Image (tube, rainbow, N blue to C red):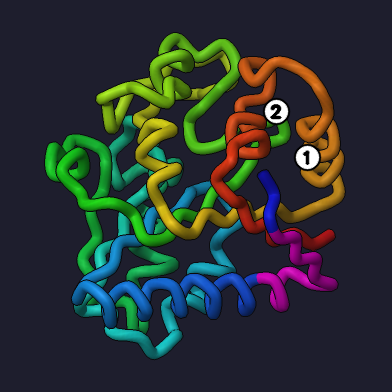
Amino acid sequence: MIATRYEFASRDNLAMQLANDVAAVLHASVVVKGAATLAVSGGTTPTLFFEKLSRVDIPWAKMTVTLVDERLVSESSMRSNARLVRTSLMQNKAAVARFVPLFNNPEASQLDRFDAVVLGMGIDGHTASFFSGGDRLADALDPATPLRLVEMNAPGADEPRLTFTLPVLFSSGFIALHIEGMEKRAVLDVALEDGPIEDMPIRAFLRAKAPIILYCCP
């Protein structure tokens, strides 16, 4: 469910507020348990948020950054989410943080509970790599699955993907949904209506008891 909804006049304002909020959650986790883990999404939307977060002064050396999902491509590919994170987030003050990519990396399945998760949404209503028509969508959405990561093939995805499952993402105490543009706002409005989760998998988050914080701008 959307517990809190923040609307901003510009991408810059949104990116700054989201960066500050995520940084505060991570810092608090470090204070309480000595470490923190952040899972972020790829695509073009989060680039400005990544840049601003990378400059926030928090104890990055005690933090781990990973991805919500990944295309099964090497980091040399321009379509690699890991490449995006390394070039946009793992810079400036955040350069000392530990980054755990998903592709060809067994370590990813051993990560601790996420302290913060930042999701995006595609114009088809997918989030992470939960795609309508995905061959393992049921596994990814199963709240009782023991699986942490599943490979996903779907008509709406250009390549096979790897994604953390719903219970792993739901275990976070802070889940943000980052949406920019009127087209995606319209998609969100449709997703909030009645209809099968399988048609628009973002509905799994919008209908869950776990609170989601929405950050959106035109």
The residue sitting at 49% across, 68% down in the picture is: 50
Give whichever of 183, 109 is nearer the camera: 109
Task: In the rendered view, tell whether residue 17 sits above or below residue 216.
Answer: below
- Answer with left or right where residue 105 lies relative to residue 124: left
Give whichever of 91, 49 is nearer the camera: 49
Q: Quadrant of residue 23?
A: bottom left
Magenta span contains residue 117:
no
Magenta span contains residue 6:
yes
> For the magenta stretch, what is the residue range?
4-14
Q: Position of residue 20 (x, y in %)?
A: 54, 80
- Answer with left or right where residue 125 lies relative to residue 175: right
Callout 1 secondary element:
helix
Residue 188: image tag: 1
Give whichever of 158, 203 is nearer the camera: 203
Instruction: Quote the CA–CA distance across marks 2 and 1.
Output: 10 Å
The residue sitting at 47% across, 17% down in the picture is: 137
Q: How many numbered discs sit on the rendered protein?
A: 2
- Answer with left or right where residue 15 lies relative to residue 13: left
Q: Which residue is mark 2?
A: 124
